[in-house]
């Protein structure tokens, strides 16, 4: 029995080459889209964590420092610092 090998047609070979080249050309796009998604997720997580830290510091400052500022008669006092230029920050707005 004689083994007959059928030569690959040139159109089939050309189609495979075109498919491989198309996939290789699309690879940078796939990598870019994946990296964009990863960085967006990481930035959202970092922004959320930073927001939590800032809110915690602001809450601590409001409850432990600002509320504790009273004068001798028990009235809330005006807070002013030369470091707070341009800001009018008062404990009691009606003062």
Image (cartoon, rainbow, N blue to C red):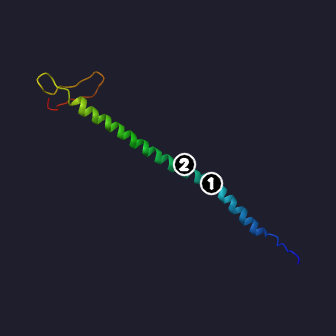
> What is the number of the mark on residue 27?
1
> What is the number of the mark on residue 62?
none
Residue at the location (65% across, 55% down)? 25
The residue where tag 2 is placed is: 35
Quadrant of the rendering where the N terminus is positioned: bottom right
Q: Which x, y percent locates residue 38? A: 51, 48
In the rendered image of this protein, does residue 90 appear above or below residue 20?
above
Residue at the location (39% across, 41% down)? 49
Outermost residue, left direction? 73
Q: CA distance from mark 1 to mark 2?
A: 12 Å
**Side of 94 where 15 appears, left or right:** right
Outermost residue, front direction? 1
- Check disc 1: other Cα within 10 Å, few if <14, some if 14-19, many if 20+: few
Q: Which x, y percent locates residue 44? A: 43, 46
- Sequence-first tag of 1 and 2: 1
In the rendered image of this protein, does residue 73 appear above or below residue 44?
above
**Side of 28 where 43 appears, left or right:** left
Residue at the location (59% across, 53% down)? 29
Splitting the image into 4 quarters, where does residue 26 fall?
Answer: bottom right
Quadrant of the rendering where the C terminus is positioned: top left
In the rendered image of this protein, does residue 3 appear above or below residue 62?
below
Q: Secondary structure at mark 1?
A: helix
């Amino acid at each position: 029995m004689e083994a007959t090998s059928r030569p690959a047609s040139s159109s089939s070979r050309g189609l495979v080459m075109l498919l491989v080249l198309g996939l290789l050309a699309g690879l940078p796009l796939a990598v870019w889209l994946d990296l964009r998604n990863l960085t967006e997720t990481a930035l959202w997580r970092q922004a959320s964590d930073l927001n939590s830290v800032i809110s915690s510091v602001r809450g601590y400052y409001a409850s432990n420092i600002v509320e504790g500022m009273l004068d001798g008669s028990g009235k809330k006092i005006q807070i002013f610092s030369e470091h707070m230029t341009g800001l009018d920050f008062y404990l009691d707005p009606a003062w």
